[in-house]
Image (cartoon, rainbow, N blue to C red):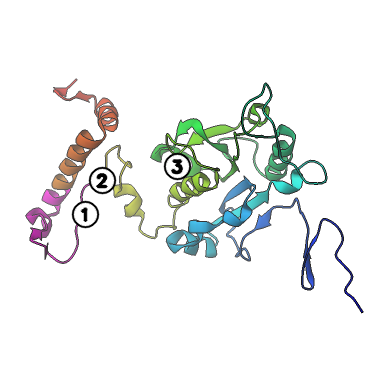
Amino acid sequence: MTDTPPPMGRKSHGRLSISANRQPRSLMDEPPRIKGAWTAKIVTLFPDAFPGTLGLSLLGKARELGLWALETIDLRPFGIGKHHNVDDTPAGGGAGMVLRADVVGAALAQARIGTPQDRALWPVVYLSPRGAPLTQAMAQRFAQAEGMTLLCGRFEGVDERVLEQFGIEEVSIGDFVLTGGEVAAQVLIDATVRLIPGVLGNADSAVEESHSNGLLEHPQYTKPAEWEGRAIPEVLMSGHHGKIEKWRHEMSQALTRARRPDLWAQYLQKQGKTDAGEA
C-alpha cells in the first residue's frame, strides 16, 4: 500500500497540508484583544518575519494582554498564474523587478476590509527610502489612529499606480536601502505601539525620552555611584529635584546643539529664540 500523493500546489506535512490562503493570518495563536485595540495590518511577502522583535519585552506582553494586535496578509496568494508571480520587469527597461499593481492592489483591498476610510483614523503606509523621515511626531500621530496598514516593499519597489490609487503615505526610517520593508515596518510599529496608553506601564517614560520635547535625552546614570574612576554627577545625588530637572534640561540642550544642529534649530524656532537669545 502506498500513500496518495498530495494534490499539485499543496505541500504535505504528515497529515497536514498547507495551501495558499488570501485571508489575513493572525500570529502565534492570536491572543484575545481588547475591543478597539490598535491594530497593525502588514502586507508582506514574508509573514513569518512577524512578530519578530515586536513579540518581545513590553510590546510582546502588551500584545498578549490585547492592548494592540498584529495581522499579516501574505502577498504571494494574490500572485498571478500557476506560480503566483507578484512582480515583473520595470516598464521602460532597467534592472530588477517591480511589485505588480494588480497583485498589491488586491492585497490592499483585502487589508482595507473593516477599516475606516479616513486616513487620519487608519493610515496606509509604504515603507520606502524616498518617503518622509519617520519622526516621534509621526509615531504619535499613528498611535492616535485606530490602527494602520503597512506595505512592505521588495525588489525595486512597487508600481506607482497602486500607491496613487490607495492614497498611500510613504515613510522612510533613514537614508539607506534595505532588502525589504519588513525590518522598517517593525521599527515603525515599535515606535508607535510604545506610545499607546498602558503599553510602557510608566507613562512618564514616553514623556521624558529623546525627541518628545524636541531635544535629545539627557545622560542617564545608575549604580554603582562610582565606576572605573567615574562618578555620577553630584547634582543627581543631591536629592534636590529642582536642580536635577534644571541640570537634565541643560544637558539635553547641550547634547542637541552639539550632535543634532538640525533639531536644535527647530527647537529654537519653536521657542521663538535664536542662538543669540530672544528673537
- Of the 4 image quadrants, the one containing the N terminus is bottom right
Question: Separation of disc 2 and disc 3 at Cα?
Answer: 17 Å
Q: CA distance from mark 1 to mark 3?
A: 24 Å
Please, what secondary structure does the residue beneath circle 2 have?
A: loop
Name the residue tied to disc 1. 220
Pointer 2 and pointer 1: residues touching (CB < 8 Å)? Answer: yes
- Kind of residue sitting beneath label 3: Ala
- What residue is shown with label 2? 217
- Image point 44% across, 53% down: which residue? 197
Q: Earlier in the sequence, mark 2 or mark 3?
A: 3
The C terminus - image quarter: top left
Q: Is residue 137 above or below residue 278?
A: below
**Residue at the right extreme, as displayed:** 1
Judge by depth and name the residue closer to the eye, 43 or 178: 178
Q: Are marks 2 and 3 in contact (CB under 8 Å)?
A: no
Residue 139's label in the rendered image is 3
**Lower position in the chain sequence, tag 1 or tag 3:** 3
Residue kind at label 1, given as amino acid type? Gln
Residue 238 in view of the camera:
no
Few, some or many residues within 10 Å of mark 3 (<14, 14–19, 20+): some
Q: Which residues are magenta?
A: 217-245
Judge whether residue 30 can be spotted in this image.
yes
Give coordinates of residue 130: x percent, y percent.
Answer: 50, 30
Q: Residues within 10 Å of mark 2 (few under 14, many from 20)?
A: some
